[in-house]
């Protein structure tokens, strides 16, 4: 269900700083029109850490309504509090999400046993397919391959979004438990090598602004057209890198704003791009014909 080209979609705000539902629904439609396989609301790129609980529910609901069963919706419902993650996840289940994306608990630095019990508890509490999200650069801790392989024995833990940057770790999961859990790339610039090792797709940031091209690359890999996939990977590499020239999602949302899709506003402690980085971004977007 959660394979192929998936987008960690941005959350636009209006001039008053509130959730801009009209623009959001247009962004969802843009994704579906360009072949995105799965929509992922309220991930890191969706500024999940600064939207309120009420807004979190509103964003997921708007996504589910706009998608209208055309593609799966994988709702970001993770937290560093297991109880809070359960509450958000239960509501996502009630309003019709197809699955849950659950970031590894951040800041409190649990042990590997703590990670295991966190995910096991969520799997027992919410009867939806669940995708773990390992991003040590943001959480401060790595969910090891041994822990992931142990969790793969739980039926509704179906995949892991690997954003550790460690292809060896991803390969170990695939080698030892690839028949029980899918690995998804969490880094656009590593999607091709990770899929070459057996990953089933990517939850992409770049797909926010170039969904058709990300889909084309992933589809080429799936169909064994490796020369074409490599060409697309290399063409997109500078864009992947530039979208992380400052903290995600600031460059991505700025790009969408420059393309006329939404406002660029982010919430503190994120701020607008620094002028010199904005010029670099504009140069790359112009090169790709986006502005």
Image (spheres, helix red, strand yellow):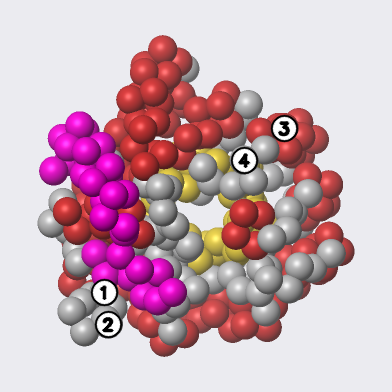
* Residue 225 appears in the rendering: no
Q: Which residue position is annotated with label 3? A: 168
For label 3, the SS is helix
Q: CA distance from mark 4 to mark 3?
A: 9 Å
- Reply above or below: 210 against 88: above
In the rendered image, residue 279 lying in the magenta stretch gets the answer yes
- Most extreme residue toward the top is 227
For label 1, the SS is loop
Asked if disc 1 and disc 4 are in contact, CB closer than 8 Å, the reply is no
Q: Nearer the viewer, residue 12 or 243?
A: 243
- Reply above or below: 68 against 60: above
For label 4, the SS is loop
Q: Which residue position is annotated with label 2? A: 18
Asked if disc 4 and disc 2 are in contact, CB closer than 8 Å, the reply is no
Q: Nearer the viewer, residue 119 or 279?
A: 279
In the image, residue 128 lies at what x, y percent? 59, 65
Q: CA distance from mark 1 to mark 2?
A: 5 Å
In the image, residue 112 lies at what x, y percent? 83, 60
Q: Residue 101 — which label?
A: none
Q: Quadrant of the C terminus?
A: top left
- Which portion, as a residue range, is magenta? 264-291
Asked if disc 1 and disc 3 are in contact, CB closer than 8 Å, the reply is no
Residue at 46% across / 24% down in the picture? 221
Q: Earlier in the sequence, mark 2 or mark 3?
A: 2
Q: CA distance from mark 1 to mark 3?
A: 39 Å
């Amino acid at each position: 269900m959660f394979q192929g080209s998936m987008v960690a979609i941005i959350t636009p705000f209006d001039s008053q700083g509130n959730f801009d539902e009209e623009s959001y629904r247009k962004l969802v439609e843009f994704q579906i029109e360009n072949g995105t396989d799965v929509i992922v609301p309220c991930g890191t790129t969706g500024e999940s850490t600064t939207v309120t609980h009420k807004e979190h529910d509103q964003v997921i609901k708007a996504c589910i309504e706009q998608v209208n069963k055309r593609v799966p919706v994988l709702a970001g419902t993770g937290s560093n509090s297991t109880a809070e993650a359960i509450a958000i996840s239960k509501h996502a289940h009630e309003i019709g999400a197809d699955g849950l994306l659950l970031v590894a608990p951040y800041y409190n630095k649990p042990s590997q046993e703590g990670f295991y019990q966190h995910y096991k508890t969520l799997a027992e509490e919410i009867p939806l397919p669940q995708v773990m999200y390992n991003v040590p650069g943001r959480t401060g801790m790595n969910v090891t391959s041994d822990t992931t392989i142990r969790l793969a024995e739980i039926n509704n833990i179906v995949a892991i979004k690997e954003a550790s940057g460690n292809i060896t770790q991803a390969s170990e999961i695939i080698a030892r438990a690839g028949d029980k859990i899918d690995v998804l790339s969490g880094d656009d610039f590593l999607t091709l090598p990770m899929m070459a090792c057996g990953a089933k797709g990517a939850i992409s940031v770049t797909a926010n602004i170039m969904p058709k091209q990300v889909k084309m690359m992933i589809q080429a890999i799936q169909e064994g057209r490796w020369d074409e996939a490599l060409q697309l990977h290399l063409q997109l590499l500078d864009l992947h890198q530039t979208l992380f020239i400052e903290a995600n999602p600031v460059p991505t949302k700025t790009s969408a704003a420059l393309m006329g899709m939404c406002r660029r506003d982010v919430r503190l402690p994120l701020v607008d791009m620094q002028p010199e980085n904005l010029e670099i971004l504009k140069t790359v977007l112009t090169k790709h014909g986006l502005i």
